[in-house]
């Protein structure tokens, strides 16, 4: 879990330097480390931050996918009710910002990638 914290710091430095793609890479690494270290709070934070960074960078599939994957993964770790309480809000906010069509397109793109 310490590695996740270090990746959070690296992501912040990348953002300070104007490197959004680098920040996204570090946030993805933070998420992996949080999962490997069984650190659910860090995992949630990294997943939500990853989604936000992907959205800013224009990658709707990744923005949706980060939240959807985290929803399922956290459910495996702590149970579906807590995972639902954690991720349904951010997913709803994404749908509200994007509208139903854009949200559905991102979801479909994510699901197609998962099937591959």
Image (cartoon, helix red, strand yellow):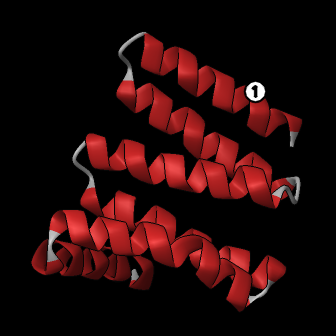
Q: Residue at x 26, y 82 (%)?
A: 108
Side of 73 where 93 appears, left or right:
left
How many callouts does the rendering have?
Answer: 1
Side of 107 where 50 appears, left or right:
right
Q: Quadrant of the C terminus?
A: bottom left
Q: Quadrant of the N terminus?
A: top right
Side of 65 where 100 appears, left or right:
left
Residue 93 at x, y = what percent?
34, 67
Question: Is residue 104 positioned above or below 90 on the image?
Answer: below
Which residue carries the number 1 mark? Answer: 6
Question: Is residue 90 positioned above or below 75 on the image?
Answer: above
Q: Quadrant of residue 29?
A: top right
Side of 28 where 99 appears, left or right:
left
Residue 64 at x, y = what percent?
37, 67
Residue 35 at x, y = what percent?
77, 58
Q: Residue at x 87, y 60 (%)?
A: 38
Dot 1 surroundings within 10 Å: few (below 14), some, or many (20 or more)? some
Q: Residue at x 66, y 23 (%)?
A: 9
Q: Residue furthest bottom?
A: 80
Q: Residue at x 22, y 74 (%)?
A: 103
Q: Quadrant of residue 79?
A: bottom right
Question: Is residue 114 positioned above or below 53 on the image?
Answer: below
Residue 20 at x, y = what percent?
37, 28
Label 1: which secondary element: helix
Q: Which of the two residues, 40 or 89, is positioned nearer the viewer here?
A: 89
Q: Residue furthest top?
A: 17
């Amino acid at each position: 879990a310490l590695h996740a914290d270090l990746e959070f710091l690296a992501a912040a430095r990348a953002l300070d330097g104007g490197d959004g793609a680098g920040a996204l890479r570090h946030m993805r690494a933070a998420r992996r480390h949080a999962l490997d270290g069984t650190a659910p709070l860090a995992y949630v934070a990294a997943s939500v931050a990853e989604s936000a960074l992907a959205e800013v960078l224009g990658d709707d599939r990744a923005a949706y996918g980060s939240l959807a994957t985290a929803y399922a993964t956290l459910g495996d770790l702590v149970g579906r009710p807590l995972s639902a309480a954690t991720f349904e809000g951010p997913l709803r906010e994404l749908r509200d910002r994007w509208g139903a069509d854009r949200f559905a397109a991102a979801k479909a793109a994510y699901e197609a990638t998962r099937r591959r």
